Amino acid sequence: MRILKNCYFVLGLFMLLTFSNPLTAQTSKYPAATSRARKEFPDEEGFSNSRIQQMGKDGLLLTAQSIKAEKGISSYRYSIINSNLQEIQHNILGVDRVRIGSGMITKSFLGPTHFHQLFLGKKKFVIHSISRSGLEKPIEVEGEFPINGRIEFVTVLQEKFIITMKSKSAISLLFFDWKTGDVVLTPVELPKGVKAKKVTILSFQELSNINEIATVLRIKGKSPSRNLCMMHSANGDLIRSIDISPKQEDVTIIECRISSPAQNKFIFAGTYNNRLQKMAEGVFIAESDNTGLKYLTTTTFLELKNFTDYMPERTQNYINKRVERAENAGRKMTLDYYVTIHPLVSTADGYFLVGEAYYSVYHTETSVVNGKTTRSQVFDGIQYTHAVLVKFDLNGKRIMDQCLPMKKFVSAGQLLGTRDVPRFITLNVSVPYQIAMSFVVDKYLIYKVFNHSGTEISRNQCEVVAKGNENEVIQGASSSLQHWYDSYFVFYGYQTMKNSDGKKRVSFYIDKLEIGN
């Protein structure tokens, strides 16, 4: 975390973090979430790393991976669980890691009819597709990439997966048919004189309401960098190319999300800074038609009402003093922070932007070699501190903002193999004229509902309490929680339990929770 612009310094925020155990039941003024169903799903012999993919009212998909590869083949177990936590189908499929090669990455997507898991090597790929209903046989396909390059992003549109692949000389879109494994290559036509090595892909996402995919590029040059948004059809045809370069010279786009609320109307929102770097100093929103930007407005983090409230008190006081000193000198202070943005929520009178703020956590290791002492910083993971909710009107004017506490740590190991920063707040827009946010703070589940004007209309908070068998004691647990459907949440993870005889066992559990009843 750094404060920039006229006063440049670094805040020492690499601190020892202590957390209360979210699974320890204590006296609380809030009611416990109601458990509607709970079931254990012990790992089959030879399998581990169970994970959950919620599928709304269709149920859950439980996946697990074999601990060892037998003759180079890793096995993956897929179980369809209904909303009553009953298993209705399971399949075990394999991936030949020898054939797919080293450096394999895994991506998963939930489609309208199937759950898809992609295994991407440097030259080959495998796709597993599992029916959401559990009534159809799984589909396995494999194939080869038509070109060599580095995989940047993956998304899904209609019945196809699309991958952006970058090499030294080109940027390409690869369209995969998950039923057959066929691949169609579409080169991205860069502006004349622009080389691929000068281009960074900032964003790649589907616009399902218009059946297009949007790629946002940053083109580095001698003058301030340019930003270009290129939109292709599901067949790879270029539909439009829009120059979205900010007119403000002190605005460099860091992260960008796109939505298309109306015909030939596109909204861009994300984070920015005054120069090219990973951290941001604020959020922006912009509108364009097919030709270029109509407006782009910015809001610094320090302009948000309570952005610093969730930092340590000593850090808050330090920032406040620096801000006051800068204002007295007629200067503007800005705060650099990491914030990842959710897809924009469009309403009849404006737009909601939701972001999750975090910082990197390191520890220092000291080593002595040949009598010489060296110290190095080792990345431990990222610590989320709070969420940001901002409402903009149709002209990009900020009319409401609120920051909400959020405590979540993600280890470095959990971030391996992914370029996207995980997001943990769940947004629910299924109820007309409302936007609901659910998130966890310590051991509490908080569920807030706002109307489209940005006014908070309800707030529920309950305690999440781990449960087990009556004759066992829970000695440890890892847990995750996410919104499932309607008022239900799924609470899951591994528990270590000890019975009255002193015997221990580890099991994966799923708990269906309801809030507000």
Image (cartoon, rainbow, N blue to C red):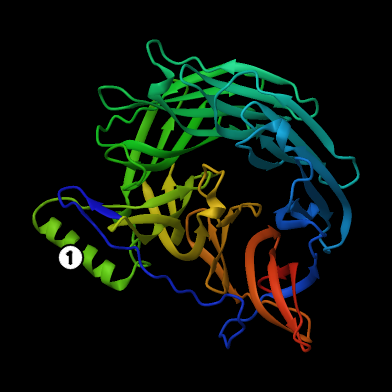
Q: Identity of the amino acid at label 1?
A: Lys
The quadrant in which the N terminus is found is bottom left
Visible residue check, residue 423: no
Relative to 396, residue 294 above or below? above
User: Residue 237: x and y, percent?
Assistant: 60, 16
Q: Report whether 354 appears left or right of 46.
A: left
User: Residue 53: x and y, percent?
Assistant: 71, 52
* Observer-nearest of 16 and 265: 16
Q: Write down the residue under mark 1.
A: 321
User: Residue 442: x and y, percent?
Assistant: 52, 72
What residue is rendered at 89% in x and 55% in y? 88
Q: Report whether 443 appears left or right of 491.
A: left
Visible residue check, residue 17: yes
Residue sitting at the far top: 192
* Observer-nearest of 190 and 90: 90
Q: Report whether 189 appears left or right of 480.
A: left
* Observer-nearest of 24 and 505: 505
What residue is rendered at 51% in x and 28% in y? 215
Relative to 327, residue 245 above or below? above
Relative to 116, residue 65 above or below? below
User: Residue 360: x and y, percent?
Assistant: 40, 56
Displayed quadrant of residue 233: top right
What residue is rendered at 32% in x and 27% in y? 225
